Image (cartoon, helix red, strand yellow):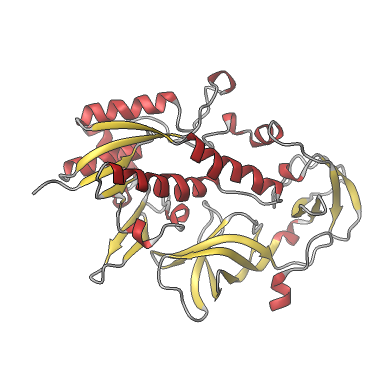
Amino acid sequence: MSKKRVIVAMSGGVDSSVAALLLNQAGFEVIGVTLRLWTINREDNSPLHQGCCSVEDTDDARRVCQELGIRHYVINAENEFKKHVVDYFIEEYQRGRTPHPCIACNDRIKFDFLLKRSLALDADFIATGHYARTLTGADGFTRLLRGIDKGKDQSYVLFGLQQHQLQRLLLPVGRFPKSSIRSIAAENNLPIADKPDSQDICFIPQGDYRSFLEARLKPTVGKILDTNGQLLGQHPGIEFFTIGQRRKLGLSTGEALFVIALNSEENTVIVGAEEQLYSQKFLIERINWLTREPLSPVNVDVKIRYRSSMVPATVTPRGPDALVEFIQPQRAITPGQAAVIYFEEEVLGGGFINTIGSNLPGTKPSLINSIG
């Protein structure tokens, strides 16, 4: 009986490298695939930049595959990455929203694009180095679970997966804490055992997203208003602001002010006191249910940022959208970011934050207020 073939998305980092190692040890026929996503000019990049997808990362992935004795391929996905990740990133900021490019990359590139390409290699599965787990029941339904290492759990960025993708997905490192993954890499002489984790957005050198946007857009100067509609100053473009921001507002009011809302139609930035950042209700748009969609309100936990904690909430499905109401108000709920729904260890679904429950001047009337 032939071995099951698995395509491992290899970024050149320790997590995806150990994923390939574990699957190889488990008896799979493993093929490493590195996606070329974005070409960065090294002269523009700081030596401290800890993104991914560089030439050095590709070389690291190739070296690991040589150590494991498995095949390695590089697939050019730059056009797809630009369309589905970079262009989306820019457009969301133009709309006064704060995007999450890693979620777009996972949805449209690492799983959708890679899964389709894996068919050409007659693969049974694809695998990544994400810290999450899958569990398939007797009914054939596959659930997405949080990683064992809660400090590294990456289930938040995987909420957009479809059932047919989950059923062909292997996540071997999600069963281990990060410390064990590094130990496994060292014990098996993988050359990337001590390599630092990537931290920056891979297509933005030095993490300076404002310079990246400014080079590709023509920002329009607009008004900065307080929550009473009073003019406080001017801004260089709403693309350079996000909800909760305090620094680089260009104001000298003598008080601590935070970005409360952004209005792309009016090209205004609304600022206010920190307590005005707190909201209790919001709408999720483009919701994806990994489980069967509930028919009535459900009491769950919701995360509104990758690094935030899960917070108790009630979620009411509304077709392609859902209404979320937290038990306690939460700080800086940000349009464009993901809201992911959990029940205990399982990811039930998620979507993108749209309308926040507020009535600030200069913003559209809140859908939340109109539906109670």
Percent x, y of residue 324: 59, 70
In the figure, is residue 241 to the left or right of 155?
A: right
Residue occupying image coordinates x 69% and y 63%: 278
The quarter of the picture where the C terminus appears is bottom right
- Furthest-bottom residue in view? 296
Residue 334 in which image quadrant: bottom right
Classify 206 as above or below 311. Answer: above
Nearest the eye: 45 or 258: 45
- Please identify the residue farthest to the left as the structure is shown: 1
Question: Is residue 183 visible in the rendered structure shown here?
Answer: no
Q: Quadrant of residue 320?
A: bottom right
Q: Name above or below for residue 345 compared with residue 293.
A: above
Identified at 40% across, 49% down, the residue is 111
Considering every residue shown, the one lying at the far right of the view is 230
Position of 15 with respect to 47 (left or right) is: left
Residue 117 visible? yes
Residue 300: x and y in percent read 48, 71
